[in-house]
Image (cartoon, helix red, strand yellow):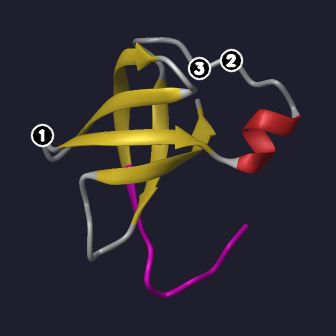
Amino acid sequence: MNDRDDRMELDGHVEESLPGTLFRVRTKTGQLVLATLSGKLRQNHIMVLPGDVVTVEVSPYDTSRGRITWRR
């Protein structure tokens, strides 16, 4: 787990799957985030489908892009 102070973790659900392992994620705050898969999810071939509940790591400087770090 990465304990960086400049990252925010948001919960949400995947709305759309896009080409190139990109996903549109709607967070619980109603914000839309364009997210890609983290390295561990890619390495372990974790499938992420529309409707899945995920945790997204975003930067406070650009909250419209992020990285999916966990799928529930």
Stretch of the chain drawn in magenta: 1-10
Q: Is residue 45 magenta?
A: no
Give the residue pinned by disc 1: 30
Q: Nearer the viewer, mark 1 or mark 2?
A: 2
Q: Residue at the location (44% across, 74% down)?
A: 7
Q: Residue at the location (25% across, 61% down)?
A: 63
* Residue positioned most to the left: 30
Is 27 on the left-hand or right-hand side of 49? left
Give the residue pinned by disc 3: 48
* Residue positioned most to the bottom: 5
> Which residue is nearer to you in this view: 49 or 64?
64
SS for dot 2: loop
Q: Quadrant of residue 20?
A: top right
- Disc 2 marks which amino acid? Met
Q: Earlier in the sequence, mark 1 or mark 2?
A: 1
Give the residue pinned by disc 2: 47
> Which residue is nearer to you in this view: 29 or 58?
58
SS for dot 1: loop
How far apart are the two marked residues, 2 and 3, measured between alpha carbons?
Answer: 4 Å
The relative height of residue 65 versus residue 1 in the rendered view (above or below) is above
Whether the residues at callouts 2 and 3 have beta carbons within 8 Å, the answer is yes
Q: Residue at the location (49% across, 18% down)?
A: 19
Magenta: main secondary structure: loop
